[in-house]
Image (spheres, helix red, strand yellow):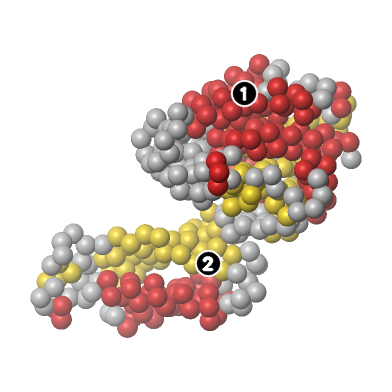
Amino acid sequence: MNIKKKITSLKDELIELRRDFHKHPELGFKEYRTAEIVANYLEKCGLKVKRGIARTGVVALLEGNAPGPTLLLRADMDALPIQEENEVPYKSVNNGVMHACGHDAHTAMLLVAAKILSNYKEKIKGNIKFVFQPNEEVGGAKVMVEEGVLENPLVDAAMALHLWTPIESGKIGVTAGPITATLDVFNLKIKGKGGHTGYPENAVDPIIAAANIIQTIQTIQTREISALKPTIIMFTKIKSGVKSNIIPDTVNLGGTIRYFYKEGVKDEEKINKRFERIVEAICRAYRTKYKLKFYNENQSVINNLNMTKLVITIGEELLGNGDKIIPYVSTAGEDFSEFANKVPSVFYFVGAGNIEKESHYPHHNPRFNIDEDVMLIGVEMHVRSALEFFNK
């Protein structure tokens, strides 16, 4: 079978799948319709299918004709709570929910790759697990690992790709070592004493404390941590007050912290300890109290050197040498780290940015879309990388 010719013959099916998923997006752990379509498709490919892992996840097993290692290929299925602004025939019909990150295409590409690879049993010395994961945005991979996705049979290596509009269509971004950032989420509640805006001396204003915390926290990145250790601290939620002439008694703040490096073992070197030191000092200065919680959402994805070389080799064969395969890291969080922390893995980006096709908008934007032609690259990377893994 000519792989490229077969993929091209399935292009219409690939696009139809992607557009159907895009039109009917579902939030994390609620991907019921998506999971049903995925499971039925995989069963028609003759694969052993397990439904309901991590609630809405689907896992299919392709057993080769000879014993050997097990390779995991992963796609994510969840959408985002965003109102789509694209005017396309396949625009989301679910109000306030949108595939604004490319997971619709990831699911479609891996389905078509599974269909093709199911015809290559004689070349597969081992097994392939096709994992369709729910809730990538909020740690669904961890639940899948806890429920045994890396077992029966034991997984020896894992691979995943992500369509990426910041990279030009026709290119692949990958690097050995850290490729995505550790992602911590924080929630901060500042407690003051409510009152009348005409008599602020009788109140304890939590808003002015919050304003100073937001400003001062930025010095952690610029004054306490080396510029050679990129750190991003973002406040993304501020909630307080009910009326313009009432001093509220509380302010709720939320946001994220992203970094690639391993933190020092001393408390004073840890970002969350630096963060709380500033919060505590400012709250004391402004006579307020606080409650602060941190949650680790994702660890940094660390690409295995040999698995990365495999992707580069296949990418160069597919796209040619030169500037088509670029070293790339992203400050985005990615829960594929739950797999990469357990087995040798590689995670890479397939460029999908094309201004002429209006696929240049950033991820998580209401105008996000992809260059659908690059899905052919994604499918071929899945298929050729998997076959080369077993060939090696």
Q: In terms of sequence position, does the residue under pointer 2 or pointer 1 come before the other? A: 1
Where, quadrant-wise, is the N terminus in this rendering? top right
Number of labels in the image equals: 2
Where, quadrant-wise, is the C terminus in this rendering? top right
Label 2: few (<14), some or many (≥20) within 10 Å? some
Q: Which residue is mark 1?
A: 12
Residue 48 location, x and y as percent? 69, 22
Q: Amino acid at mark 1?
A: Asp
- Answer with left or right where residue 231 lies relative to residue 254: right
* Camera-nearest residue between 161 and 28: 161
* Camera-nearest residue between 319 and 137: 319
Q: Amino acid at mark 2?
A: Ile
Q: Residue at x 79, y 40 (%)?
A: 318
* Camera-nearest residue between 289 and 82: 82
Q: Residue at x 48, y 78 (%)?
A: 219
Q: Which residue is mark 2?
A: 232
Residue 304 shows in the view: no
Asked if disc 2 and disc 1 are in contact, CB closer than 8 Å, the reply is: no
What residue occupies the far front of the structure in this picture?
356
> On residue 360, which mark appears?
none
Residue 221 shows in the view: yes
- Answer with left or right where residue 324 lies relative to residue 286: right
Q: Which type of secondary structure does the marked residue at label 1 adopt?
A: helix
